[in-house]
Image (tube, grey):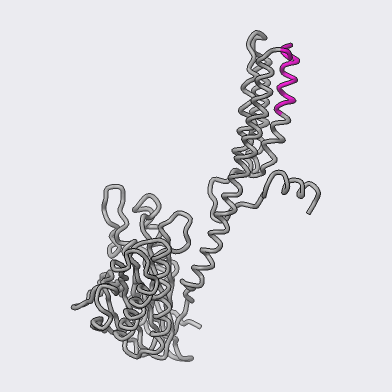
Amino acid sequence: MSATGWIRERFAGPTPGAAPGATGTWPRTALSLPFIGMALVAVLDYFTDAAVTVEPALTAVPALAAVVSRRTWYPLAIGLCTEAAAFLMAFHNEVLGESVHGATVFAIVLVAVIGWVSATLRLRQEKALADAQLVASIARRVLLRPVPERVGTVRAAVHYEAAAAHARIGGDLYEVVNTRHGVRAVVGDVRGKGLGAVETAAAVLGAFREAAHQEPALDRVAGWLAVSLDRALHENDHPGVEEEFVTLVLIGVRPDGTAEIVNCGHPAPLLLRGGEPVRQLELAETVPPLGVLDPADVRPPVHRIPLRRGDRVLLFTDGVIEARDRAGAFYPLADRLPRCADGSPVDVLQRLHEDVVRHVGRQLGDDAAMLLLQYDPPVPPGAHLPHQNGLAAQPRS
């Protein structure tokens, strides 16, 4: 570290780079604004009647420096320059001995020191926020692992948006795994927010990652999750444990292309099949969210549908369909999905998210997760791939 850097660290506090995700950072050209303001005051004073002084307006210059710069020493440096300008103006106007000059000098010093203190505190808060965001990002990668583009016989994509402005993780959960029973996925929503919701989501995801491989029947996977959730809630024993529950939907895509769906109080998935209207995969019978019934009573029915190549199944949380515009209208996901259906699963979810944001016109008020699975089994070498579902079939590596 240079001598100047050492001095700044000891006397001016930390000077980190831009905090991840920070908004409203001024461009470097904004550093010239204090000098422009100082020059404007000097010009105004030069063309003003000598009986009237505008020297006190210089006190705004170090305050402006504290606003436009992330360097804590900058308000002090501008304060020194402003003091020099104040003495030159007072000498020119022959008011060095006047009380207005003395008051201006004192005010400039005071504002520069206040600017230094405020810049130091702001940078420390930004550093703390950046550290918290880093921890949240690491926790998200551990809890909500990235979904690969190809998982067994499906292509997959996920989009997750936490409701909190600077959060990276919330109460929604998702996972896709490839097992000997086929591809299995879960999307769920934990009641509530905050650390308790994250702990509950972690318990459910940990149980799913184990049960999806061990249990051949999808309804028994749901039962496994119910037992794990019940144990986790009572082990944590946090306030309101009796009111905690998790809505979720499980889907399994067997090697023969049959999709199995289990719904526990969650919004029904949507099936997008080329040339056909969007179909809501409502089950004839569902069970309440996990945590409502005794785990021994969780015996959800399994709904089965055959998938064709190119079929897409969208799983989502209620943060998407309950997103309201300024008039209070919910986002019509089933109507908007076909408009966003071109391209890869990643492209589809990105367009859907942008459409939701346009509908709402502001940041979402709830966590929102979307998981899109496209049935696309690998093509054996030399095999002919016909056109199906109105989609132009493309050979894939």
| Image quadrant where residue 74 sits | top right
Residue farthest to the left, as pictured: 284
Which of the two residues, 137 or 279, is positioned nearer the viewer here?
137
* Label tally: 0
The image shows residue 213 at horizontal and vertical percentages of 41, 87
The image shows residue 207 at horizontal and vertical percentages of 40, 80
Q: What's the residue at 48%, 76% (across, down)?
A: 148
Examine the rendering and report whether any part of residue 93 can be seen.
Answer: no
The N terminus - image quarter: bottom right
The image shows residue 167 at horizontal and vertical percentages of 47, 59
- Main SS type for the magenta part? helix
| Image quadrant where residue 90 sits | top right
Compared to residue 113, the image places residue 241 above or below, namely: below
Q: Residue 97 vs residue 364: left or right?
A: right
Compared to residue 147, the image places residue 94 above or below, namely: above
Q: What's the residue at 44%, 91% (across, down)?
A: 383
Q: Residue 114 vs residue 303: left or right?
A: right
The image shows residue 9 at horizontal and vertical percentages of 72, 49
Q: Residue 301 vs residue 19: left or right?
A: left
Which of the two residues, 18 or 197, is positioned nearer the viewer here?
197
Which of the two residues, 339 or 110, is positioned nearer the viewer here?
110
| Image quadrant where residue 211 sits | bottom left
Examine the rendering and report whether any part of residue 186 can be seen.
Answer: yes
Q: Is residue 229 magenta?
A: no
Q: Which residues are magenta?
A: 82-97
